[in-house]
Amino acid sequence: MHQTLENLERLRLGSVLAEDILVNTKNPIIRKDTKITREHIQVLRAFNVNKVPIVIENVFSRTEEEISKLNEDQVETIQDKDEPATQTNFENLYNQAVTSFYKEFSAWETGMKVDVAKLRNIIMPLVEKAMTDKKIFSHLNNFSSLDNYIAHHSVAVGIISGAIAKKMRHPSGMIKQIATAGLLADIGMSKVDAKIREKKSYLTEADFSEIKKHTIYSLQMIQDSPLLKSELKLAIFQHHERLDGSGYPKGEKLDSISVYSQIIAVADVYHAMTSERIYRTKSSPFKVLEMIREEEFGKYNIEAVLALISLVGDLPISTRVHLSDGRTGEVVFSHRDSPMRPMIRLTETGQIIDLAAKRSLYIESILV
């Protein structure tokens, strides 16, 4: 293999790095053998790298298939996506799902049976839509509101559960089952006294005891449905259990808790903590993910947590963000082991801040 130093301004998309690129960082900002994309060029420019070592290949030895693949890679990199339109379409679909779910919820309060097929058809288009644009996951809590919170929460948990399952490479049939179970997990709240459910102050111990019964009610409401596998019915019943035994309704531990309920548990706690509630303001998705992974370590399935981090926290280069101290900037480099704490170039000064080193700062939100 031969190599040459190529000027950044002349660097072609699809070129292959001959060496790791180190710029006063512990780890390479871009690794050897990486095919250069437009995002990589932005990173190099942000770090004031003017020349990079590039592999020299004999193009005459390439097959037509290899040349075609290189061209496809370059075209894919150059194409721009209409992200705002995608988000608008998703939000419309999401609001329709919330409205549909709330109608069903009101019917359950009067004793109507649960139509699992209808609910599955509500949630799956949203899961599929969200997986085409990962930025949706970091904005999902913004769609929620105090009005009809239970409907917002149920729809969001269904979306996130299905997406986590897909990231964990579950079969497509099981992804549908898990997403539907996530949507159904809190349907038992329709059997809890509305005065407790909608209380605008802190819950008493007696109130919370009633709230905790919702997992039992949820199971009872879907127990006879042939459209939901038995293991997913168990997942609905167990989605508030924790691996360390601190959950409810039975205080189960470790292997006694279904892996599917562990997926729903991660989706449930993440959305609840990032959404505005009567008794607290919403928290940054990035801060919440750190809390789940670090402060709550041992309670949640780490594979499910890491899948959610890859959905929410792995931000593309040039993503514009709002920091916890009020400043704004854009992502110029993501750490492989800490994607939620990338390097940020500040908008006003151009200074680059490494959030992995500056732990007092975190990303508050993504700017659209």
Image (cartoon, grey):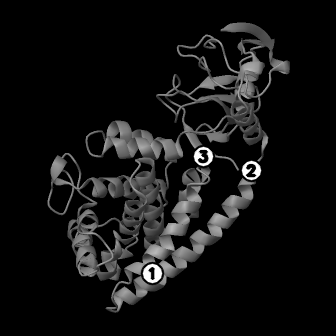
Q: Secondary structure at mark 1?
A: helix
Q: Earlier in the sequence, mark 3 or mark 1?
A: 1
State the CA–CA distance, disc 2 to disc 3. Answer: 21 Å
Question: Which circle marks residue 164 in the picture?
Answer: none
Height in image: 27 above or below 101?
above
Taking depth in this image into account, of 138 and 49 the one nearest to the observer is 49
Q: Residues within 10 Å of mark 3 (few under 14, many from 20)?
A: some
Q: Which residue is mark 1?
A: 118
Q: Which residue is mark 2?
A: 81
Q: Residue furthest right?
A: 10
Image spot of residue 362 (x, y percent): 54, 36
Q: Which residue is mark 3?
A: 365
Height in image: 198 above or below 314?
below
Q: Is residue 288 visible?
A: no
Using the rendered view, name the quadrant where residue 210 is placed: bottom left
Which residue does the image show at 31% across and 91% down from the upper left? 111
Taking depth in this image into account, of 258 and 16 the one nearest to the observer is 16
Which residue does the image show at 37% across and 74% down from the upper left? 199
Q: Secondary structure at mark 2?
A: loop
Q: Is residue 316 left or right of residue 106?
A: right
- The three-letter amino acid code for the residue at tag 1 is Lys
Q: Is residue 235 left or right of residue 49?
A: left
Q: Nearer the viewer, mark 2 or mark 3?
A: 2
